[in-house]
Amino acid sequence: MRNNYYPFVNLPLPYPYDELEPYIDTKTMELHHDKHLQTYINNLNDALKGCPELQKLSLEQLIVSSARLPKDIGTKIRNNAGGVYNHRFFFNGMQNPEDSTGEPCGRLGAEIVKTYGSFDNFKKEFKDAALSVFGSGYAWLVICRGKLGIITTANQNTPLEAGMCPLIALDVWEHAYYLKHYNVRAVYIDDWFNVVNWRMAEANYLKFNL
Ligand code: MN3
């Protein structure tokens, strides 16, 4: 089930809350999924409640068309549809550290080495980008005009609005790490690399890069 249309429901995580231990703690996952994501879902449904025309649009269509909507509802839809899309993408892009390949594989793995020189250098550039987000936002590995790129987005903005195809997302809002790491975002980023689902990233890459 993808639940890509109104009314949106909070799909369960694709793994148990404690699946990402010891790198991402159970309590953070419970709050992040059941409270933070749930709030975006509720607010998005609330914004769409009286708008039958907009209810026909998919989550992605809502995001890319939000800029053309009247400012008050456009902003509400952009922020909350983005919050739903970004969190689903982030959660789906992680897995049990025992199952993670630890580094990118297949054609994506080869393309990362070609673009960044080595996986270690990619990690360094991605971490620098994630640390550079001022306030709340995300770091992403994307395809932009046929090439790999590392970008950041503020708040709940998405790469979709800029016409980019996301492969991997890292949520760097403080609620993603504060319980375990307090204010130390750098260690959270290091920990996150242990639970990246590179097979999912590869599947995203193949889907967008045929
Ligand atoms: Mn979050």
Image (cartoon, rainbow, N blue to C red):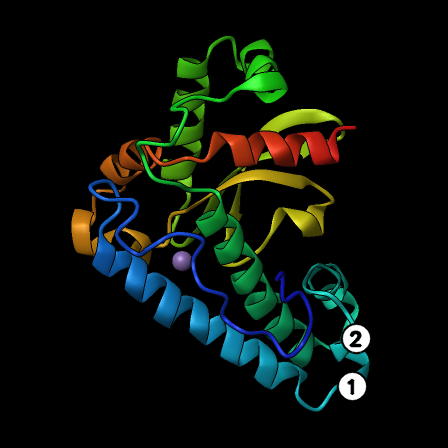
Res. 7 image quadrant: bottom right
Res. 73 image quadrant: bottom right
Q: Which residue is the site of mark 1? A: 52
Image location of residue 85, percent across then percent down? 57, 58
The disc at residue 56 is: 2
Looking at the image, which is closer to me, 181 or 129? Answer: 181
Task: Tell me what residue is drawn at x 60 percent, y 28 percent.
Answer: 149
Quadrant in which the C terminus is drawn: top right
Give the answer, above or below, for where 176 lies relative to 207: below
Q: Amino acid at mark 2?
A: Lys
Is residue 28 rendered to the left or right of residue 47?
A: left
Is residue 167 rendered to the left or right of residue 35?
A: right
Task: Tell me what residue is drawn at x 53 percent, y 50 percent.
Answer: 89
Task: Tell me what residue is drawn at x 69 percent, y 30 percent.
Answer: 206
The outermost residue toward the right is 53
Res. 188 image quadrant: top left
Q: Can you see residue 119? A: yes
